[in-house]
Image: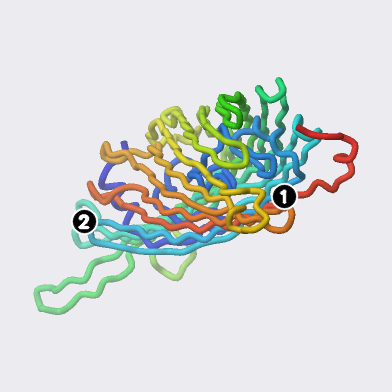
């Protein structure tokens, strides 16, 4: 695991915003390829991300591609967010707020109820941190060292998904291919200076710059990711169904290009004393991912379900020797939704869908034999707009990490806004006849 002293250096920091960050700044994004983004859109996020086995015909499900055929509308879904994150140690506290565009997604039924395709753009991972710490140089007590660490960037993903009905009203399958691309930049600056002192003549000595080293690493990633899914449903009553879903994301060796620069200065106004730079190509291995879910639902009324994910990050490896000592990650999601009366003509609020969910994740980061866990409480509303469009508003309160053993706890509050534009007016619908 990561050594305690080295990690505490990384955690006494000043937050910075990544140039293309999709999530709030977090010191834990220093590990691996950063903080991974969830695939769920805002409608599912309001249930904690629940979505492996539950879908609707007017909602685009991005969690399991096998659920795409349930969507019988041409759908455009855009998501925005704002987030406040407060970081705490046993004696320090710091906050930051960020926000912006979360994702763009489009669903197109090619044959309504039987075959639907989707395309979209969303972040895959995010890196955003800033760190500042000081200390004494070993075996040189008169010299102080100041360390500044920074990281920004992330990996984005554009994807194409498709889902098919295999056995009517029973078995569905789907797949998704995504192209990932992006850059992550990490920098380290070390300043050495002579410390202030009082000499034998009681004269105060002035601290002065001694030497500065600046190390910068830029990593560019690109590759294709493949994911498959299955979905099964069966009636267990007149209007009640039980639903099962499974997803599997293949392992990937991401093409990686890295450039590293080391600049050493002696503190004078002259050009750098020494500069070293090199470029290299390699691969970054991402492990496979499994997920399964089960839910019970009553059509147009309610859904209650549970999802489970597993990914063994101990096999994460980079050709550049940055294995990170990550561990296995698991996540459990419990959530549901309720609509009082979707077809009510007297009460607007009876047509509103109310959602709630809980998610608990054991992240792959372990420090001092302590797992860094993430727990979230989610809730939201889905508000009908016009004849078929929907405004989604979701809220999440979460905690990541702990203040024990010299670590950092992150408290965060996130507000999501999503707009779903649904339409059935396109020409191909008129040639399909009735849909199921």
395 up-or-down from 179: above or below? below
Query: Are the residues tagged 1 and 2 within 8 Å (C-beta)?
Result: no
Q: Position of residue 347 (x, y in %)?
A: 62, 58
Q: Position of residue 302 (x, y in %)?
A: 55, 41
Q: Earlier in the sequence, mark 1 or mark 2?
A: 1
Q: Residues within 10 Å of mark 1 (few under 14, many from 20)?
A: many
Residue at x 22% of width, y 46% of height = 405
Distance between the alpha carbons at the discs numbered 1 and 2: 62 Å
Q: Position of residue 21 (x, y in %)?
A: 54, 55
Q: Which mark is residue 229?
A: none
Residue at x 41% of width, y 29% of height = 314
Residue at x 59% of width, y 46% of height = 41
Q: Position of residue 322 (x, y in %)?
A: 44, 37
Image quadrant assignment for residue 385: bottom right
Residue 278: in sight, yes or no? no
225 lies left or right of 318: right
288 lies left or right of 148: right
127 lies left or right of 72: left
State which mark lies toward you, 1 or 2: 1
State the SS at label 2: strand
25 up-or-down from 175: above or below? below
433 up-or-down from 47: above or below? above
Image quadrant assignment for residue 192: bottom left
Residue of label 1? 76
Q: Residues within 10 Å of mark 2 (few under 14, many from 20)?
A: few
Q: Quadrant of the C terminus?
A: top right
Residue of label 2? 140
């Amino acid at each position: 695991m990561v050594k305690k002293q080295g990690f505490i250096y990384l955690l006494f920091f000043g937050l910075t915003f990544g140039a293309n960050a999709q999530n709030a700044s977090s010191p834990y994004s220093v590990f691996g390829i950063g903080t991974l983004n969830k695939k769920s859109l805002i409608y599912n996020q309001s249930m904690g991300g629940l979505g492996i086995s539950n879908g609707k015909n007017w909602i685009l499900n991005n969690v399991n591609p096998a659920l795409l055929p349930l969507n019988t509308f041409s759908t455009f879904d855009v998501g925005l967010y704002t987030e406040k994150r407060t970081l705490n140690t046993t004696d320090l506290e710091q906050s930051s707020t960020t926000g912006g565009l979360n994702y763009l997604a489009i669903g197109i039924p090619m044959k309504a109820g039987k075959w639907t395709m989707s395309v979209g753009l969303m972040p895959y991972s995010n890196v955003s941190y800033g760190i500042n710490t000081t200390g004494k140089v070993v075996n040189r007590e008169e010299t102080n060292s100041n360390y500044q660490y920074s990281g920004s960037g992330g990996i984005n993903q554009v994807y194409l998904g498709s889902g098919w009905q295999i056995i009517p009203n029973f078995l569905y399958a789907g797949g998704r291919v995504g192209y990932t691309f992006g850059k992550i930049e990490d920098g380290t600056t070390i300043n050495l200076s002579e410390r202030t002192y009082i000499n034998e003549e009681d004269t105060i000595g002035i601290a002065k710059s001694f030497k500065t080293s600046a190390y910068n690493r830029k990593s560019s990633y690109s590759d294709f990711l493949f994911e498959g899914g299955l979905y099964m449903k069966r009636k267990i009553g007149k209007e009640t169904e039980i639903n099962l879903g499974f997803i599997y994301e293949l392992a990937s060796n991401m093409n990686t290009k890295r450039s590293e620069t080391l600049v050493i200065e002696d503190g004078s106004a002259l050009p750098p004393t020494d500069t070293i730079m090199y470029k290299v190509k390699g691969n970054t291995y991402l492990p496979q991912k499994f997920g399964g879910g089960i839910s019970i639902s009553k059509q147009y009324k309610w859904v209650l379900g549970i999802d489970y994910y597993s990914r063994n990050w101990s096999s994460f490896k980079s050709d550049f020797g940055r294995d990170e000592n990550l561990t296995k990650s698991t996540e459990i999601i419990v959530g549901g939704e309720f609509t009082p009366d979707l077809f009510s003509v007297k009460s607007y609020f009876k047509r509103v869908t109310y959602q709630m969910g809980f998610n608990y994740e054991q992240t792959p980061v372990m420090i001092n034999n302590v797992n860094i866990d993430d727990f979230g409480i989610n809730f939201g509303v889905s508000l009908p707009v016009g004849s078929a469009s929907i405004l989604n508003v979701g809220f999440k309160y979460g905690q990541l990490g702990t203040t024990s053993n010299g670590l950092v706890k992150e408290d965060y509050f996130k507000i999501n806004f999503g707009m779903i534009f649904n339409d059935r007016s396109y020409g191909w619908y008129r040639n399909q006849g009735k849909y199921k």
